[in-house]
Image (spheres, rainbow, N blue to C red):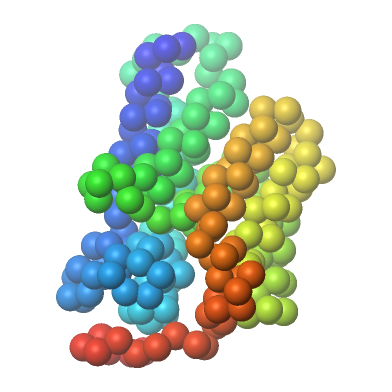
Amino acid sequence: MLIPCLITALAAYLIGSFPTGYLVGRARGVGLRSLGSGNIGATNALRILGKPAGIFVLLVDGAKGLGGVALVPHIGRALGGATASETGSVWLPVLGGVSAVLGHNFTCWLKFRGGKGIATSAGVLAGLMPLAFVTVVATFVVTILIFRIVSLGSIVAAAVLPAATWFWHRDPVLVGFSAALALLAVWRHRANIRRLRDGTEPRIGQSRAIPGVPRP
């Protein structure tokens, strides 16, 4: 099982480490790491580059997580010669999901400074825990509709994730995995939590125009 695990972890990390927002920003002549929140994820891309670019980053980053749990484990099993009992194990998809999120959050291409992992985590959940995914997305959307703060939606959704996973899937491995994802997401939002506490976190529609960057 060691070889399939190593292949899965490495391949999923490399897929997750693809710095989508950074590259889209550079293609527009904009350095996302020095504007807005300084994050290369979909929210900052949306705020700085506009809706088309932000949606593109969101979809690609989500696809990285989905690939980490739905595609990469099959490669690891095939190349690593996994046994029949190992083929049905949930451990390789979980490992692929963790590695994809870590790749996004700590990309090796940008000195291990990446995004916050929300879109990539969503892709992981869609492939691994679809019912929990639907619950978390609904929580995210409702929170944003009420408060119009994306980071708050992400934090509340992360907090709901472990309970949703237990309610729908009742698998201790998946519950532990979802709890780890939730803790990582909240930790990556610690600056946002400080701004929420201080009342300075921007709401949707409060983005400021950046010189030289066309608005949608």
Q: Residue at x 72, y 79 (%)?
A: 146
Residue 51 visible to the viewer: yes
Residue 123 visible to the viewer: no
Q: Quadrant of residue 195?
A: bottom right
> In the rendered view, does 92 fall on the left or right side of 106?
right
Q: Residue at x 34, y 19 (%)?
A: 79
> In the rendered view, does 175 fall on the left or right side of 14?
right
The percent position of residue 140, horizontal first and vertical second, equals 66, 65
Q: Residue 86, relative to residue 53: is it above or below?
A: above
116 or 63, which lies in front?
116
The percent position of residue 101, horizontal first and vertical second, equals 45, 44
The percent position of residue 73, horizontal first and vertical second, equals 45, 29
Q: Residue 103, relative to residue 44: is it above or below?
A: above
Quarter that holds the C terminus: bottom left
Q: Residue at x 49, y 29 (%)?
A: 95
198 or 143, which lies in front?
198
Q: Residue 137, relative to residue 44: is it above or below?
A: above
Q: Quadrant of residue 112?
A: top left
Q: Residue at x 21, y 88 (%)?
A: 212
